Amino acid sequence: MSNDFPSPQPPPSTPQQHPQEGLPAYPGPAQNPAYAYGPTAPQRMPGAVRAAQIVLWVLAGLVLLGSVVIAATGDAETAGAAVGVNVLVMVAAGLALRFQRAGGGTRVACIVLMALQTLSALGGAANGNPGGLLPLLGAIAVIVLLARGDAGAWFDRPRPGH
């Protein structure tokens, strides 16, 4: 007597052996080729990162310009104090030059520097220095821009040669 019925197949929830590697293969919907390798890293610098970069450069330029103007009036001590109080902005502006190639450490360093700049500017404002308002607002803007998720994805992206 011949068996006219096909042999029973295992239920879909049990793993089947992959024919080539011997690894379990779970039956399911076909993979979308667009997502075959997981999420992709951004290829262009996000607007938030570019905006933070520009804010840092503008702040550094204003600090230098203000110091030159103050020094030209003959008050070198005040000009030096203006640069000294805003040295954190200058360092962060230097780091902003590397935003195109830098990793997550540069982002964290800029956020920490701008948090310290915020405290410094608040201290200056408490002492009646109105010149600390612009660096205060700029520092807060940079912190907000660099704390965004797309900024984190940009700095944590895989880069060739790293």
Image (cartoon, rainbow, N blue to C red):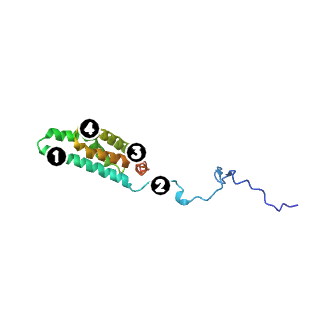
Q: Nearer the viewer, residue 105 or 6?
A: 105
Disc 4 designates what residue?
126
- N-terminal label among 3 and 4: 3
Marks 1, 2: nearer the viewer: 1
Look at label 1 and name its amino acid.
Answer: Val
- N-terminal label among 4 and 2: 2
Q: CA distance from mark 1 to mark 3?
A: 34 Å
Kindly indicate whether the residue at mark 3 contacts the one at mark 1 (C-beta within 8 angstroms).
no
Q: CA distance from mark 3 to mark 4?
A: 33 Å
Q: Position of residue 84 (x, y in %)?
A: 23, 39
Q: Nearer the viewer, residue 67 or 153?
A: 67
Q: Position of residue 86 (x, y in %)?
A: 25, 41
Q: Residues within 10 Å of mark 1 (few under 14, many from 20)?
A: some
- N-terminal label among 1 and 2: 2
Q: Secondary structure at mark 4?
A: helix
Q: Farthest residue in the bottom direction?
A: 4
Which numbered marker is on residue 40?
A: 2
Query: If the image is split into quadrants, where does the N terminus sit?
Result: bottom right
Q: CA distance from mark 4 to mark 2?
A: 46 Å
Disc 3 designates what residue?
104
Q: Is residue 128 above or below residue 32?
A: above
Which residue occupies 84% across, 60% down?
Answer: 3
Disc 1 designates what residue?
68
Q: Secondary structure at mark 3?
A: helix
Q: Secondary structure at mark 2?
A: loop
Q: Is residue 141 rendered to the left or right of residue 19?
A: left
- N-terminal label among 4 and 1: 1
- N-terminal label among 1 and 3: 1
Look at label 2 and name its amino acid.
Answer: Thr
- N-terminal label among 3 and 2: 2
